[in-house]
Image (cartoon, rainbow, N blue to C red):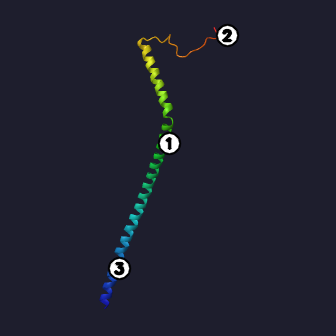
Amino acid sequence: MTVDASAKRTADSKSLTEKGDAKATAEENLQAEGEKKKGTTKELMATLEYIQSLHGECDWLLSNFDARKEARTGEIESLTNAKAVLSGADYALVQRRSHRAIGFLGRDV
């Protein structure tokens, strides 16, 4: 009977040691996964902030599209005219706007 009790005590002690080692390993893994989760959460937050900034930029581009399109059209027209002038076209006599000539004391000339 004492041999059986001694064998059981040895087996229980060995089992307790193995379970303690397993628990320590599980706690290390839990801590490592917790750190990994923190890093992933930070990365997710940075990504969400970046997406939000892109959303703001996109909204701005959409709201100002027509104004930017008109500006580009004006720039293209100006560059075309400048190119024509450099090629020898004479725009000196072309009237772009109608202006009334006003003489002395505000009278028409």
Q: Which residue is mark 3?
A: 13
Whole-number angstrom distance, CA of label 2 to CA of label 3 = 118 Å
Classify 10 Å Cα crowding around label 1: few (below 14), some (14-19), many (20 and above).
few
Q: Which residue is mark 2?
A: 107
SS at circle 2 = loop
For this view, does 56 lie left or right of residue 26? right
Q: Quadrant of the C terminus?
A: top right
Determine contact: label 1, label 2, CB under 8 Å.
no
Q: Position of residue 82 (x, y in %)?
A: 45, 17
Percent x, y for residue 68? 49, 31
Q: Is residue 24 above or below residue 103?
A: below
Q: Secondary structure at mark 1?
A: helix
4 left or right, relative to 101:
left
Residue 50: % across, % down? 46, 46
Q: Amino acid at mark 2?
A: Arg
Amino acid at dot 3:
Ser
Which of the 4 image quarters holds residue 26? bottom left
Read off the residue under disc 1.
56
Kind of residue sitting beneath label 1: Gly
- Left or right? Give the position of 15 relative to 61: left
Mark with earlier residue (1, 3): 3
